Amino acid sequence: MVMTEERRREYWRAMKEDMAEFRAAHKIESKGRSSEFVPARLITLPGLVLHELERVNWIECDGDFGYRPK
């Protein structure tokens, strides 16, 4: 499936919104320590969104269920 330019912009806009939400949740749960992995159950985003953010290399996983921004 080929994405149109408008759909591509919409996709990246949504990704940026999800990343902003991830950063806010991570900051609260890690008490401001950006290098600390936070369990996925404490992040307010669904697991598929976390996986998508990891796929585009904006966050990293500890190999279990912890996530942190890159």
Image (cartoon, helix red, strand yellow):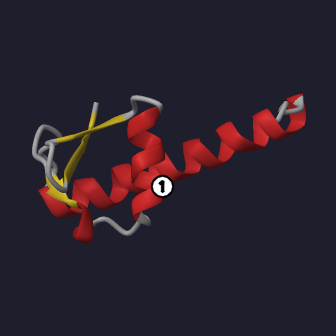
Residue at the disc numbered 1 = 49
What's the residue at 70%, 42% (across, down)?
Answer: 11
Q: Between 29 and 9, which is closer to the camera in this rendering?
A: 9
Q: Quadrant of the N terminus?
A: top right
Residue at 39% from the left image edge and 29% from the top image edge: 57
Q: Residues within 10 Å of mark 1 (few under 14, many from 20)?
A: some
Residue 17's spot in the image, x, y percent?
57, 50
Q: Is residue 10 above or below residue 38?
A: above
The image quadrant where one finds the C terminus is top left
Q: Quadrant of residue 35?
A: top left
Question: Whole-percent x and y of residue 49?
Answer: 48, 55
Q: Spot the residue most to the front.
A: 1
Tell me the residue at 47%/31% (across/down). 56
* Side of 47 where 36 appears, left or right: left
Q: Secondary structure at mark 1?
A: helix
**Left or right, residue 16 beside residue 38:** right
Kind of residue sitting beneath label 1:
Val
Looking at the rendered structure, the number of numbered marks drawn on it comes to 1
Residue 12 in picture, x, y percent from top left: 66, 37
Q: Position of residue 23 (x, y in %)?
A: 35, 49
Viewer-side residue, 27 vs 13: 13
Q: Residue at x 35, y 56 (%)?
A: 24
Locate residue 26: give its quadrant. bottom left
Residue 47 against residue 57 in the figure, above or below: below
